[in-house]
Image (tube, coloured by chain):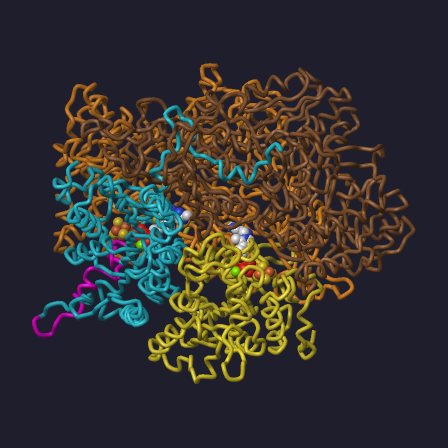
Chain colours: A cyan, B brown, C orange, D yellow
């Protein structure tokens, strides 16, 4: 398929019936992924999208690229396997907040340590959507959505902060109703060299009646003058925030700055890129240091058999150490 | 405790000492020296789940013919410390010898804190029954009473001499030489050509000439002392001329070789005993050569140009959940991909195995069984995971189970596992076990020229799929196997999901599509049952239609064949069915062997006689006898011989539990 | 599609509509109205793994006697939307009725994107065969041809009237009333006392008087319209006088009640369908009363003073690994502790179950089976986890498996599971399934006065242990069960480890202690096999020594008993063995039933006939026939009746696969 | 046992043979735990120590309190279960770095969200000790211990940082060869109201030849003047560092300060208390808000049966909602 033809988001759409609730924030994420892939002129078959389990995870069925809908909490290791075996593929990974930060918390931490070149998106809706609205790890302590029998008893985890602690080299946040900004952010994440983590604020109108579109949009606090809502969400880049580590010596400063921004919530919720550092070698680069042919001959692209199935791996060198020969 | 006739090249040797003190390399040198002299070797290693200090030992057999198992008797026990003597002196045959440090004679049993309360009590009872006290001298005296030759070696003196000769300032720097002295002394009484030991030392310490020389010098001194002390020892080792080329390796290495040869290019692991040895071996050998199609240099096809860029990527993951899922992700790209683990890690792979099965992903799980349940005895042996592996994962999904019984099967199954995974598009669980993994032996270089790589049905690139004729990953129209495409391939975009799915791989809950997919998946297992060759499924050893048939699996094979050789030589009519393909179960092939047998013995290293349960479930035939063991130590040739004989003679209870091993 | 004689109080009713549109509360109102009228109800719920919009339906049976299952036929189908009609119109009996919205007549099959491709094709073929087009009007016409009464209800008009009456500005605000109109219309043609519906509405919407009135007003209108349209409908519902007190609940609730009654005070869970309903129910009822010892108010013992402070702590964990391990930690303190999950979560509990078993910790795992493998069909039914639960965890460790077949068994087993866990100090896996969990029914309040709490052997505080006579958690000297102490208790400090351990609980690798501990653990299972009463192990239904015996387990019980009632009434000689204790397997108790039977039918909701495999493994007896189902929909009384009859008449193949359900 | 008698660390010792390697840093941790318990006058049977799997996890067998040696990576949830079912017990939890941060990473994150009143200690040796020296999550990128075939390919995780991100309300670090300091730190951790996390630098002389006692002690960089080694480890409290959040408004400041300290490594490695905040309600307190009798009648201490085993749970209230009565 010639690349020039793939320019429309609809080229990334499938005919699969979408069964999200009306008004679900996931629609925005789906659309922006399709737009970003189109704008980046990606060939659909060169892209693999991996997801966990949850409402969010169904996304892959609606995108016309290879789509791997895996197990609850395991999107990251599956995606890692795909990328490691064939680093020439573009890999996106999607999780719900329960999927990525609850049951998948251990992988979240360890993916940061690798810095593999891929983008990981968490659909942050504060609830376990598909199992009917239990509190997810991003829901704040003491709040009570309509789906809960009691106020939430756990402190929330801060995804931005955790990603920084884990070692992600690009950390961002988007909002699923700001399509234009989200497309740009997703594109930036895809283009980052290394492991990029993107938290997307994704209202779940069915179960989370607190962090709604109206709330993020500030409908409850109208500008006394014009009567216009004062959105809670604001853009980092519009306030001159510079997330980029331009020199390794800046790591500490830029990290601390990102951490401070990550603490903001409530009246002012920053979106945009919090941190970006391309001075850390990617996992692929680290492997290539040991195995120089890795990028061109990764595991997926090595011939292993001759025309008649003859095994082509030559074990001579290894066997020499394990063989006793006649005198 | 048994025969006392002079024996050439039929020896059971043991060396013991604290973990981490160099016992392993001395055993290695002993084995290599024997191998260099053309002898066959079988070595078994026993150690605690500990890094340093706890007792470990190596039991080695050296023989002119192939040996496949250990025996309970020890002919020569060598050690430089007390605990080994307390623990093992009783195992030495009456015509055997003990090589020891005479300066330890006053050590009391109660001085050794690492001896288990139960064992200490037992030992005490023994010493009292012998009318002696509880020092090491008492233990030695009791041995001597029986006829055992005592070979005191002045380890410290010898070390000091070496230190002098090689100008070493601190004795502690050469403390490990002490083990080689014990080896040297052993060869001394056995009359073995010392040159073989020197060669072995060169082999083991390769580049370090000084270390080789130092060890050789010390060992020679001990050799001479021992030879002088026991000039007429009934056991002898003699060099054999011109042996054929032989492999000398462990079961882990054999399995790794099979997998590499089979084209594995991606392996994940999380550290665990005893599985991680394999992954670490692979990691050390990550740069590969691509070339002809032989296993060894002799079969290399010079015409095929050497290609660049072959390598295997071994990834240490954060846990075993990541190990199985990452390997599965890799398999989707077309790379032959595997993970290796043991029980606790396997527990964490249940969901991943189910996902791979419903998505028809070829993936290999090498399961190194060890003694369970739970953490159990991590460094000890068992075949306890059979049923768990068979039913792994909730719901119902097909998988193939292959269980290797010896090194050659490890190599072959290493490759076949991938072939079956690809051909039947499902997980293959390759069962190995601790005894197999950690034993090392010489074995003829197997002829593997029959092995081929079979990748099964593939949807090739430029495949003619189009909008009107789209690729369907789970196509239902052409038999149970649908051509597989790799991620990244053009024209074959597909979806996977752990949910039930329709042909393209999207979620469905349609009851009829569901039925079709369930039936498709299991039909592949029926196909495998039809296609997999009989000689992979099972092997039968022994006379035709004997009254007694043994059914067993896995690494009991070596000890069984060794024991049966003796029983057959004595005229016993016993057959042995070694089952290698556990699932799909070779019901039809097995039934004829069992139907006519009067006595059927299930022999397994587990409590529940798991294979016997499967046999009954599948064939309705019940075993009449069981010989089981679950104390963590592999079955010996000796105890199997005795137990089988008892069954044949009608003297055995329905259930015999073997308990030997320390 | 069957009989057309007038029938009083024997009805199969169905309502369908998109998930989240209020279909569930209308089914609830229908059921409660019937129950209020003294009828028995059995309701089955089918829905997609989806939150909003996908098709869901409720099939309800109302009867003067106890009903325990659904049938395939539908007598009245009620809905306000098109998809339900496309999907279910064919299920309506020729003498039945369809309540629908006439304004949807022009809707075409192809307008409904949520209908699966396979189903759409199938429907089209059907419509063509009937010679009609593919609009809803065509579907209705085809129904009418068969004799089905059509009951058009002008839903929108009625809504508008209600909006007017109650001064609602936007129709969308009362959109959910539409479901109640369908219920009202149903009762209209059935001639049921409308007052019962009003009561049910009050029940369901408790505090909200306006909602009750609005719904009642609308329903009444629909009631009258429908009644006028079909005055002579052959099916009738009539109030029954003075029924005894009845429970009206779901299987999840029944299980929760049993566990609470059994003294459970700690439960962990990670959200999962269909298991989390139970935990959420417990969470809502976390504050408990301590008092007498009856289940219901009638058995309350007024003499026992009410005590304060009873509560259950329900903890939502980060995953199921944490769920099982946290619950086990809690169990060590003496709290009766459990976790509840379904297949994928159970997969993550393997190691935890092994640890609890080797450490002899009483812990209950309530396993809500759903259709696997992998994510499978999360909201659909299956009994596919039997083998997996039996062999859960690597290595070999004992556990008890109890499988409930109906609500009373759920309650009893909820309590018994804890008794057995405590008495035999091992994990108990309590198997329930989606069909049982999500079905709701009226059932007489069971008499549980025989139930007692048994905590097994305990090491009490002030127990006389001392330095010289220390407490040993795994004391080997007094039979397989060692008195258990709780963390925090004085004088009984102990250790636990997943490693093999000696009597105090410290790690050991001593081969003889190992054997003793393995044998101790499994001896407890033998003890359980001896002690557990026969009527917990199994129930036999039917004539003595019949030529045909059914072996089944779990929630097939309801449909089987309902089908057998009909077969027995017709004189069929069929027995039914309902197995409730799966492990230790009641071999001795089962054998006599099977030995003499000519035909043995294994009936299970799975592909592999898992219980039948266990029966053969344990008894050697093979089933002659299988009736299996694995399409995710529970077996109906109807299809079971047909399939069993075919076997009895010698007309069935060895394997019958049931496929009904949508 | 009267409390006054329990004053010696040896009262907390068992007769179990200790099988750690000579010179292992675990000895120091064992000893300090015994000392701290003695100094705090804890009754042995009121204490439960829970551990995972690894060399470090064997500790519980050497301490005479209830000792629960669990599964690899699962020490925290087991400990959580114990504490929740009987909050009157004192619970300590021990892990190796592989145990706690690798396979147990997900629980690490979620334990922070709860703030249960217990102390969690990680034996930080940079390697998987018991499985023979593979790289653990705290080993730095690119370094190669003698047990590794290749330089470490993963970035290290920063335990202090991660604990803060997860929500631990007390975060400290100790060094296993500074016994006095470690005893004090462990005591402070035990006495903290809420979830306390303690990272202990624990040399593994057998496999980690980089982060050795000599290295921490600075033997390789002697003071040019006196020739004395210049230790890398230094004490926060000696430099006037104040970790305590005295008022909720200080949270951000004190957190940032702790994060900055957590980044120090190499030439200067801080030990001591990084952060302490008792203004967050403990999990026990959160439960007691819903269930007022929780502390006095926790799950472990409720009567459930009468003298003859009669079930004592009265379900009347629940059943009322589930019963249909005769008219
Ligand atoms: C091991 C396991 N446990 C539980 C589940 C049940 N489950 C399905 S979706 C889901 C929660 C999804 O929540 P989240 O990840 O936040 O995604 P969302 O639906 O909110 O997009 C859970 C717990 C599962 N599939 N697997
Ligand atoms: C599920 C599982 N996987 C692997 C293992 C094997 N294992 C035992 S100890 C250990 C590593 C211990 O390392 P660490 O936690 O750092 O503790 P240390 O020995 O260094 O104190 C591993 C991986 C196991 N017991 N369980
Ligand atoms: S439940 Fe919430 S997250 Fe899920 S589809 Fe509905 S709105 Fe979206
Ligand atoms: S291996 Fe390391 S951590 Fe383990 S006991 Fe030895 S020195 Fe300590
Ligand atoms: Mg969510
Ligand atoms: Mg460690």
Query: Measured from the top left, where is residue D187 in percent x and y?
Result: 55, 76
* Residue drawn 12% across the image and 41% down it: A4
Residue C151 magenta-highlighted? no
Horizontal side, residue A289 vs residue A318: left or right: left
| Residue C203 can be seen, yes or no | no
Residue B516 image point, x, y percent: 35, 27
The image shows residue C616 at horizontal and vertical percentages of: 58, 27
Quadrant of residue B112 within the rendered picture = bottom right
Q: Left or right of C257: which side holds C397?
A: right
Q: Position of residue B463 (x, y in %)?
A: 25, 27
Q: In this rendered view, identify the residue nearer to me: C458 or A312.
A: A312
**Chief SS of the magenta region:** loop
Assess whether residue A208 is covered by the magenta stretch.
Answer: yes
* Residue at the limit of the structure toward the right, as seen here: B131
Q: Is residue C396 above or below residue A164?
A: above
Residue B356 visible within the image = yes
Q: Residue furthest left?
A: A226
Q: How many marks?
A: 0
Looking at the rendering, the stretch of residues picked out in magenta corresponds to A200-226
Q: Between C62 and D254, which is closer to the camera in this rendering?
A: D254
Q: Nearer the viewer, residue B119 or C425?
A: B119
At 28% from the left edge and 71% from the top edge, which residue is drawn? A257
Q: Is residue B632 above or below residue D68?
A: above
Q: Nearer the viewer, residue C551 or B13?
A: B13
Quadrant that contains the N terminus of chain B: top right
Is D95 on the left or on the right of C457, as rendered? left
Is D97 above or below relative to B341?
below
Q: Report the image quarter containing ligand 4.
A: bottom right
């Amino acid at each position: 398929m010639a690349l020039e033809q793939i320019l429309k988001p609809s080229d990334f759409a499938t005919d699969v019936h979408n069964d999200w609730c009306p008004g679900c924030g996931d629609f925005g994420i789906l659309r922006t992924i399709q737009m970003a892939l189109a704008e980046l002129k990606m060939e659909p078959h060169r892209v693999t999208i991996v997801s966990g389990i949850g409402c969010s995870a169904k996304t892959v069925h609606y995108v016309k690229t290879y789509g791997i809908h895996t197990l609850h909490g395991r999107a990251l290791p599956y995606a890692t396997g795909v990328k490691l075996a064939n680093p020439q593929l573009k890999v996106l990974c999607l999780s719900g907040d329960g999927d990525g930060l609850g049951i998948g918390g251990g992988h979240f931490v360890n993916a940061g340590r690798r810095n593999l070149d891929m983008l990981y998106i968490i659909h942050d809706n504060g609830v376990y959507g598909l199992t009917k609205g239990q509190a997810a790890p991003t829901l704040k302590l003491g709040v009570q959505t309509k789906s809960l029998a009691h106020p939430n008893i756990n402190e929330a985890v801060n995804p931005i902060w955790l990603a920084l602690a884990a070692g992600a080299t690009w950390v961002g946040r988007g909002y699923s109703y700001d399509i234009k900004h989200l497309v740009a952010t997703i594109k930036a994440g895809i283009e980052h060299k290394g492991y990029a983590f993107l938290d997307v604020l994704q209202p779940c109108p069915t179960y989370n009646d607190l962090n709604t579109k109206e709330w993020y949009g500030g409908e409850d606090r109208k500008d006394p003058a014009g009567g216009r809502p004062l959105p809670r969400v604001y853009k980092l880049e519009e306030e001159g925030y510079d997330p980029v580590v331009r020199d390794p010596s800046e790591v500490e400063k830029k990290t601390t700055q990102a951490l401070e921004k990550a603490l903001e919530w409530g009246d002012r919720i920053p979106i945009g890129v919090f941190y970006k550092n391309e001075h850390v070698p990617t996992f692929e680069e680290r492997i290539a240091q040991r195995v120089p042919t890795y990028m061109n001959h990764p595991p997926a692209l090595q011939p292993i058999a001759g025309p008649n199935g003859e095994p082509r791996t030559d074990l001579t060198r290894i066997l020499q150490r394990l063989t006793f020969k006649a005198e | 405790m048994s025969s006392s006739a002079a024996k050439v090249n039929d020896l059971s040797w043991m060396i013991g000492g604290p973990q981490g003190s160099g016992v392993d390399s001395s055993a290695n040198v002993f084995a290599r020296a024997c191998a260099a002299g053309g002898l066959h070797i079988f070595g078994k290693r026993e150690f605690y789940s500990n890094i340093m200090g706890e007792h470990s030992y190596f039991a080695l057999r050296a023989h002119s013919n192939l040996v496949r198992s250990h025996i309970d008797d020890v002919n020569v026990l060598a050690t430089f410390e007390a605990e080994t003597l307390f623990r093992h002196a009783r195992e030495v045959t009456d015509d055997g010898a003990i090589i020891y440090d005479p300066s330890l004679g006053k050590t009391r049993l109660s001085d050794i804190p690492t001896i288990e309360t139960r064992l200490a009590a037992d030992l005490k009872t023994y010493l009292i029954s012998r009318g002696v006290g509880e020092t090491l001298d008492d233990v030695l005296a009791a041995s001597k009473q029986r006829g055992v030759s005592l070979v005191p070696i002045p380890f410290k003196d010898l070390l000091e001499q070496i230190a002098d000769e090689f100008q070493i300032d601190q004795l502690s720097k050469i403390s490990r030489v002490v083990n080689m002295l014990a080896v040297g002394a052993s060869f001394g009484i056995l009359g073995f050509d010392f040159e073989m030991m020197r060669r072995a030392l060169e082999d083991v310490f390769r580049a370090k000439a000084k270390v080789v020389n130092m060890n050789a010098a010390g060992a020679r001194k001990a050799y001479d002392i021992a030879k002088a002390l026991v000039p007429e020892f009934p056991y002898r080792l003699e060099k054999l001329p011109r042996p054929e080329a032989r492999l000398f390796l462990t079961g882990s290495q054999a399995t790794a070789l099979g997998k590499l040869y089979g084209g594995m290019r991606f392996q994940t692991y999380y550290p665990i005993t005893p599985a991680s040895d394999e992954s670490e071996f692979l990691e050390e050998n990550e740069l590969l050569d691509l070339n002809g199609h032989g296993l060894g240099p002799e079969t290399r096809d010079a015409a095929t140009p050497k290609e660049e860029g072959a390598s295997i990527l071994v990834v240490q993951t954060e846990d075993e959940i990541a190990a199985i899922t990452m390997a599965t992700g890799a398999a989707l790209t077309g790379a032959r991909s595997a993970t290796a683990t043991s029980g606790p890690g396997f527990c964490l792979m249940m969901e991943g195995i189910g996902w791979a099965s419903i998505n028809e992903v070829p993936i290999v799980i090498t399961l190194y069984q060890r003694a369970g349940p739970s953490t159990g005895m991590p460094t000890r042996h068992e075949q306890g995971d059979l049923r768990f592996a068979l039913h792994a994962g909730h719901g119902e999904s097909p998988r193939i189970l292959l269980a290797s019984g010896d090194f050659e099967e490890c190599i072959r199954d290493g490759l076949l596992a991938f072939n079956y995974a690809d051909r039947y598009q499902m997980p293959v669980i390759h069962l190995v076990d601790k005894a197999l993994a950690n034993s090392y032996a010489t074995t003829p270089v197997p002829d593997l020229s029959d092995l081929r790589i079979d990748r099964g049905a593939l949807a090739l690139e430029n495949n003619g799929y189009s909008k009107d004729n789209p690729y369907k990953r789970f196509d239902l129209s052409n038999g149970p196997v649908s051509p597989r495409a790799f991620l990244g391939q053009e024209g074959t975009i597909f979806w996977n999901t752990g949910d039930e799915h329709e042909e393209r791989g999207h979620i469905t809950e349609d009851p009829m599509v569901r039925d079709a997919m369930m039936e498709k998946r299991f039909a592949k297992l029926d196909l495998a049952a039809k296609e997999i060759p009989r000689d992979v499924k099972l092997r039968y050893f022994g006379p035709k239609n004997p009254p007694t048939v043994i059914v067993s699996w896995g690494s009991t094979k070596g000890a069984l064949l060794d024991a049966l050789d003796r029983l057959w030589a004595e005229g016993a009519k016993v057959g042995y069915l070694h089952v290698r393909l556990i699932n799909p179960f070779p019901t039809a092939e097995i039934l004829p062997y069992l139907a006519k047998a009067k006595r059927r013995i299930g022999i397994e290293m587990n409590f529940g006689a798991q294979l016997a349960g499967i046999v009954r479930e599948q064939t309705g035939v019940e075993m009449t006898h069981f010989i089981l063991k679950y104390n963590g130590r592999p079955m010996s040739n000796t105890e199997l011989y005795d137990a089988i004989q008892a069954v044949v003679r009608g003297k055995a209870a329905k259930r015999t539990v073997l308990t030997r091993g320390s």
